[in-house]
Amino acid sequence: MGLSQQAISKIEQSDKVDDNTLEKVSKALGVNVEAIKNFSEQAIFNNINTFHDSSSLNDHSALFNYQCTFNPIDKLVGSLEENKRLQEANKKLYEELLKSEREKVVMLQKLLEEKK
């Protein structure tokens, strides 16, 4: 929006926001202006805590119909698989580093023996 954090904070704390600013906020948040104007914390809690059949929702409740667009379990499983893959890659890198360090130790021991 091109505003400082202080300006945004001032907008958040104000009771009334002019239409031009409200339009900018709605575009930045990707929501309808009406959704901001009709926002209610109670409506959000009711929507989250209650299962609604979309055919029974009234006109304004569609503005607050926040349904997850992905399966959180799939995301969790995907994250765990990625974590396992990264652990295996780290293990290989560690083993290569350890091998390299052992080779250095052997070379240094040979150099020391030659100098004796």
Image (cartoon, rainbow, N blue to C red):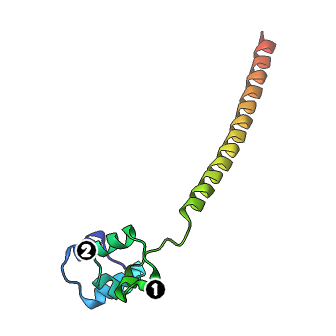
The crowding category of the residue bearing disc 2, from other C-alpha atoms within 10 Å (few below 14, some 14 to 19, many at least 20), is: few
The local secondary structure at tag 1 comes to: helix
At horizontal 60% and vertical 61% (from top left) the residue drawn is 74
Q: Nearer the viewer, mark 1 or mark 2?
A: 1
- Type of the residue with mark 1: Ser
Q: Quadrant of residue 30?
A: bottom left
Compared across the picture, whether 50 is left or right of 71 comes to left
At horizontal 65% and vertical 47% (from top left) the residue drawn is 84
Where does the image place residue 113, in percent across and percent down from the top left?
79, 13
Where does the image place residue 103, in percent across and percent down from the top left?
77, 27
Residue 55, numbered circle: 1
At horizontal 22% and vertical 74% (from top left) the residue drawn is 10
Where does the image place residue 29, in percent across and percent down from the top left?
40, 78
- Type of the residue with mark 2: Glu
User: Gap between marks 1 and 2, in whole Å?
Assistant: 33 Å
Q: Is residue 61 above or below residue 101?
A: below
Q: Quadrant of the C terminus?
A: top right
Number of marks present in the image shown: 2
Where does the image place residue 9, in percent across and percent down from the top left?
25, 71
The crowding category of the residue bearing disc 1, from other C-alpha atoms within 10 Å (few below 14, some 14 to 19, many at least 20), is: few
Q: Quadrant of the N terminus?
A: bottom left
Residue that label 2 marks:
12
